[in-house]
Image: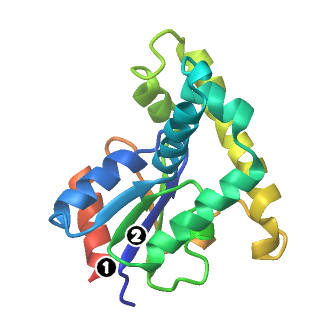
Amino acid sequence: MNYNSVALSGLPCSGKTSLCDELVLALRLDWQTHSIGGLFRERYKFWRGENLSRENIKFEEYWAKHVKDEDIREVNNEAGELLKKGKMILDSRYAAVNAKDINSTLLIFLTCSLETRINRSLLKYRDKSPDEICSILLEREQDECRRGQELYGNLFGGEYDYRDPEFYHLVLNTDAGKLSIDEEVKLILSALA
């Protein structure tokens, strides 16, 4: 199968962004990269510009109070359109949704132990204990599963769990001691060839 785009999904803090960055370098910048989070941050900047009196609202508060299900659907549809153009690397929780009916997209899922994901998150959540970070990551994962099922379950015969390996062409375990990021990139490049 010849793929002309890549869509990465994975557990929170499993290494999607790092792998996207390395893939762009390996593909010699011939490909563009987008993330669902980045697309939402662009909307946030626009929203802040339109609502100058609210400029002190952080992205997380904007997300919690202003992003609705229809916004999530709209951004994921936008990501699907980007994938159709080809030469695209997408970092998305719902990659199988973004690439549904686009046979030319290589779907990759990153998995990783909870312990490794907590350790990777220590810098992001400097004011949190490992137990608090564990709770945050598990809550995010459950929330994203629930939301994915509510928004997209009908696309997959009533069942959709973004963590299900059956939705992906390639599943990579990003725990330390498994594959290096260079080995992960080589596997992906091999699948693209």
Against 183, is 192 above or below?
below
| Element at label 1 | helix
Against 3, is 167 above or below?
above
Q: Is residue 175 left or right of residue 135?
A: left
Which residue does the image show at 31% across and 69% down from the upper left? 188
Q: Nearer the viewer, mark 1 or mark 2?
A: 2
| Element at label 2 | strand
Foreground of the two, 154 or 131: 154
Determine which residue is flagged by label 2: 6
Residue 135: percent from left, percent from top: 66, 24
Residue 111: percent from left, percent from top: 50, 51
Which residue does the image show at 49% across and 37% down from the upper left? 45
Which residue does the image show at 57% across and 54% down from the upper left? 93
Can residue 180 be seen here?
no
Figure quadrant of the N terminus: bottom left
Residue 75: percent from left, percent from top: 60, 57
Q: Quadrant of residue 99?
A: bottom right
Residue 137: percent from left, percent from top: 60, 32
- Mark 2 belongs to which amino acid? Val
Against 139, is 77 above or below?
below
Determine which residue is flagged by label 1: 192
Q: Is residue 133 left or right of residue 27?
A: right
Figure quadrant of the C terminus: bottom left
Which residue does the image show at 60% across and 61% down from the upper left? 76
Q: Quadrant of residue 32?
A: bottom left
- Mark 1 belongs to which amino acid? Leu
